[in-house]
Image (cartoon, rainbow, N blue to C red):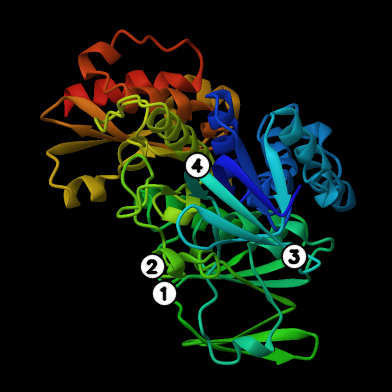
Amino acid sequence: MTADQTFDVIVIGAGSTGENVADVVVKGGLTAVLVESELVGGECSYWACMPSKALLRGTEVLEEARAVGGAAAAVTGEQDVAATLARRNSFTSNWDDSGQVTWVDGAGIALVRGAGRLDGEKRVVVTAADGSTSTLTARHAVVVCTGSEAAVPPLEGIDDVEVWTAREATSAQQVPGRLVILGGGVVGVEMATAWSALGSQVTLLQRGDRLLAGQEPEAGDAVAASLRDRGVDVQLNTSVTAVRKDGDGVVVVTGAGEVRGDQFLVAAGRRARTGDIGLDTVGLAPGEYLDVDDTLRVRGVDWLYGVGDANGRRLLTHMGKYQARQAAAAIVARATGEQVSMADWSPFVATADAAATPQVTFSIPQVASVGITAAQAEEQGIAHTVVRYELGNVAGSALFADGYAGKAVAVVDTDRQVLVGLTFVGPGVSEMLQAATIAVVGEVPISRLWHAVPAYPTMNEVWLRLLETLRDQ
């Protein structure tokens, strides 16, 4: 790579979002370069989705086996912690990105290692690990895919304590004896589930009155009850005021007293990783989420795009990839003179960000949801009705696990007679989510859903039960 090069598209950040942007624009006939200062493949591959789910999978399998009479008798031992951690390591390729680099090269995408920083219009200066710099110029677009990072609150004493964030929690090579978690969102819940099952004594501190606060209430209530059944000390309505070192451990000070631990995991939200990428050189505020339109183009800067977590719209890997496909299609279209439609559900806009985002929390029980909650429908002024059904009353659920417990919560737009949100809570529900996503995205009329006959006996029979309940309400 020479000191100065020109490409059609420069992508800052080679995580899954950036990789997808580059792949689509190259397939569209443009040239692209990825700029990455860490591991190619990004957060999801090494410190988020893949390692966290690998940590959780063994626990989930054992839970399912123990819930089936006959099979339960075969489970005579406990989870092999060392083997579980080794399997987790394999899913990160032991934090080696050579496989991802090979893919990038095979896809015809250039790669520059180093920290990328905007330097005025369509220019990016890359500083390599050895301090050398190179300058890249874009003919059409620069795409910021720098993601997000853990937001650590300014607690008293926090700078004197070795804090875990999601990165440390998903990559730890030993089970912490006592783990204190601040935050009851997805990261906090999943890590409480994973590490408690592997032998850690876990305390989960949540400022609000419910876990998974953005989900339907049934989700947080069920997960809190399950965690407590597994020995996790779940403390709701608990504010943390300070932390301090305690030998090799930590003391977390709350309004109710003190909690001691060997590790302190802060899972209290995310913030944009845009503080040091030169946004000030193009008239934008550093450190903020990028304000983008529905094609993910930064408002007021027609050559700059913010895709994935960097825009703060939906902080989920699959939504970053979705945004990448939409933004890249728009970039190619604009570069080749094609008209870009801004209409909902066009090939160039990220409509699903607002209307149909799917999400799974891999807790026990799982929480799988898509669309909006009942509370959000109320806030948006949508005329709606809420339909609830006990998943345990479905024949397929009873076959899945003895004493199956779970819930389905559907939100129906009563004016348009379409489903706008659906939440499943229970073992194995993640695999039912795509059908709900299709129903929401396709705005399938309730009258037509009656013709989508669920196979018997599967848990999907809950769709029929929801329709029957809606009819009879």
114 lies left or right of 420? right
**Quarter of the rendering occupied by the C terminus:** top left
- Image point (66%, 68%), residue name: 202
Q: Earlier in the sequence, mark 3 or mark 2?
A: 3
- Please name whichever residue, 242 or 295, is drawn nearer the observer in this view of the structure: 295
Percent position (x, y) of residue 367?
49, 43
Percent position (x, y) of residue 130?
81, 67
Marks 4 and 3 sit apart, C-alpha to C-alpha, by 53 Å
The residue pinned by badge 2 equals 209
Marks 3 and 2 sit apart, C-alpha to C-alpha, by 24 Å
Q: What is the crowding at mark 2: few (fewer than 14 residues within 10 Å), some, or many (at least 20)?
A: some
Disc 3 secondary structure class: loop
Q: Earlier in the sequence, mark 1 or mark 3?
A: 3
Disc 2 secondary structure class: loop
Marks 2 and 1 sit apart, C-alpha to C-alpha, by 5 Å
Picture layout, residue 234 above or below residue 455: below
Q: Are marks 4 and 2 in contact (CB under 8 Å)?
A: no
437 lies left or right of 361? left
- Please name whichever residue, 17 or 92, is drawn nearer the observer in this view of the structure: 17
Q: Earlier in the sequence, mark 2 or mark 1?
A: 2
Percent position (x, y) of residue 18?
58, 43
Q: Are marks 2 and 1 in contact (CB under 8 Å)?
A: yes
Q: Earlier in the sequence, mark 4 or mark 3?
A: 4
The residue pinned by badge 4 equals 139
Q: Within the image, what quadrant is residue 30 found in?
A: top right
Indicate which label's residue lies in the foreground, 4 or 2: 4
The residue pinned by badge 1 equals 237
Q: What is the crowding at mark 4: few (fewer than 14 residues within 10 Å), some, or many (at least 20)?
A: some
Indicate which label's residue lies in the foreground, 1 or 4: 4
Q: Earlier in the sequence, mark 1 or mark 4?
A: 4
Disc 1 secondary structure class: loop
The residue pinned by badge 3 equals 200
